[in-house]
Image (spheres, rainbow, N blue to C red):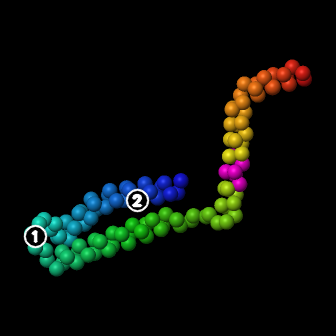
């Protein structure tokens, strides 16, 4: 689940980054047209946009993990609950696979009681 969330966040960030980058470049005066002459300040703005943006978003992603409380004990608890759930599902699928036989056996047992 975490890997899927990370993947979707990466795709969304990649899609939004183009819009953000060109918006930031226009704010600093950089002209992306072919043959355009840019001032040294515009070039520094270009450098800054390629440095500050990724640093900011990596730090934002790191901030998402503040308060994340997954230690070995918590992981073990989650793992044991998942194993118990899987065991219940396997037991349910065994009955489903032999559903007709299970109904007949249960019907016989209920008559004898």
* Residue 91, horizontal then vertical, whole percent: 73, 39
Instruction: Indicate the quadrant where residue 23 lies.
Output: bottom left
Which residue lies at the image location 43% right of the left edge and 54% below the top edge?
8
Query: Which of the numbered marks, if any, corresponds to residue 10?
Result: 2
Seen in the picture, residue 68 relative to 108 is either above or below; the reply is below
Drawn side of residue 89 relative to residue 45, left or right: right
Drawn side of residue 95 relative to residue 112, left or right: left
Q: CA distance from mark 1 to mark 2?
A: 32 Å
* Residue 84, horizontal then vertical, whole percent: 72, 48
Q: Single out the residue that lies furthest toward the right.
A: 113
Which residue lies at the image location 33% right of the left edge and 73% below the top edge?
52
**The magenta stretch spans residue 56:** no
Q: Single out the residue that lies furthest toward the bottom.
A: 40
Question: Of 44 and 85, which appears nearest the observer?
Answer: 85
Q: Quadrant of the C terminus?
A: top right
**The magenta stretch spans residue 81:** yes
- Tag 1, which secondary structure? loop
Q: Which residues are magenta?
A: 80-85
* Residue 73, horizontal then vertical, whole percent: 70, 64
Magenta segment's dominant SS is: helix
């Amino acid at each position: 689940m975490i890997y899927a969330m990370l993947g979707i966040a990466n795709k969304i960030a990649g899609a939004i980054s183009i819009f953000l980058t060109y918006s930031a470049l226009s704010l600093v005066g950089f002209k992306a047209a072919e043959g355009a002459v840019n001032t040294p300040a515009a070039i520094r703005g270009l450098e800054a946009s390629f440095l500050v943006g990724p640093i900011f978003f990596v730090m934002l992603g790191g901030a998402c993990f503040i308060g994340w409380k997954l230690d070995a004990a918590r992981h073990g608890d989650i793992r044991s609950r998942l194993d118990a759930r899987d065991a219940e599902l396997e037991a349910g699928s065994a009955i489903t696979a032999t559903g007709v036989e299970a109904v007949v056996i249960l019907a016989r047992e209920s008559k004898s009681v």
